[in-house]
Image: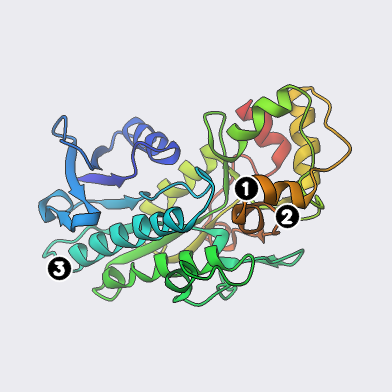
Amino acid sequence: MAVVVTGSSGLLGSALVRALRDEGRSVVRLVRRTPSGADEAYWDPAKGVLDPAAIEGADAVVHLAGAGIADRRWNDAYRRELVTSRLDGTRLLATTIAELERPPAVLLSGSAIGLYGDTGEHPVDESREPGASIEAPADALKDPGEKGQWLAGLVRAWEGETLHAAEAGVRVVRLRTGHVLARQGGFLGRMLPLFRLGLGAPLGSGRQYVSWISLPDWLGAVSHLIAHPEASGPVNLTAPVPVTNAEFTKTLGRALGRPTLPVPVPAFALRAALGELADEGILIGQRVLPSRLLEMGYRFRHPRLDDALAAIL
């Protein structure tokens, strides 16, 4: 039996494929091009194309496909791509799984802590209600609405598409992922060039909380969730000790042995450079705790930021 992975060319997906194969698991990658071997299968979410045989009887399906939230400045066209790339693929997978005679043992579907909206200084876990209504993305293509709420609506709608599989009796885990720290890219990878030049600085007030997780812990948590049949529903993939943006800045500077600037980058400059993404992903605070993971006995390799950065860098 195999683990089927979508989004396998991205930072998380490519690392997951390597980790699963290192564990001795067979992996099938769903790809949107002509497959190059027996370990790949074609699908096209936009056209609703997926051969059920590719996922029939799999040990697990890990769904990570979707346009990168911070890959481009947001406009109407890119917000539409963020919506369709998540909802179309998740709907296709979940409805196909629901109709199988031998469905996968579990669907682990990508999600994000953006669902919680701006939590300020208040710690939240999986019991927290989402930050916006499920209808928000469609409305937001015309009117972004309240700052910090569009992304919450998108993530809630994204998770909502997994209900097709859950209602058919399939175990579904929603991977509410925070900022994954890895040298190769993502949140940390974008920061490293500036910090190595000694140009790192707090962003906005610096008081907003950053919920992070090291790439090794993200991979370990996914493997843990595959292996534990009691795991279902939303699970926060974040380290147990979130930090403020100012603390993150100082800790990263120390880890690199470089100074950081004492003057923060003002919010208006971030908005000018990044548009809506500044308010949705950088200036809001999210103090998110991994209560479900801890309850299920997952032991973090890097519970604290200084340990994580030392290991990564």
The location of residue 297, given as percent across then percent down, is 53, 55
Sequence order check, earlier mark of 3 and 1: 3
Which residue lies at the image location 56% right of the left edge and 34% below the top edge? 182
Q: How are the colours assigned in the image?
A: rainbow
The location of residue 143, given as percent across then percent down, is 52, 71
C-alpha gap between disc 2 and disc 3: 42 Å
Q: Nearer the viewer, residue 238 or 200?
A: 200
The location of residue 158, given as percent across then percent down, is 40, 65
Which residue lies at the image location 46% right of the left edge and 74% below the top edge? 139
Mark 2: secondary structure: strand
Please name the amino acid that badge 1 sits on: Leu
The answer to whether marks 2 and 1 mark residues whose Cβ atoms lie closer than 8 Å is no
Task: Say which quadrant the N terminus sits in.
Answer: top left
Which residue lies at the image location 20% right of the left edge and 38% below the top edge? 33
Q: Nearer the viewer, residue 126 or 35?
A: 35
What residue did someone put label 3 on?
99
Please name the amino acid that badge 3 sits on: Glu
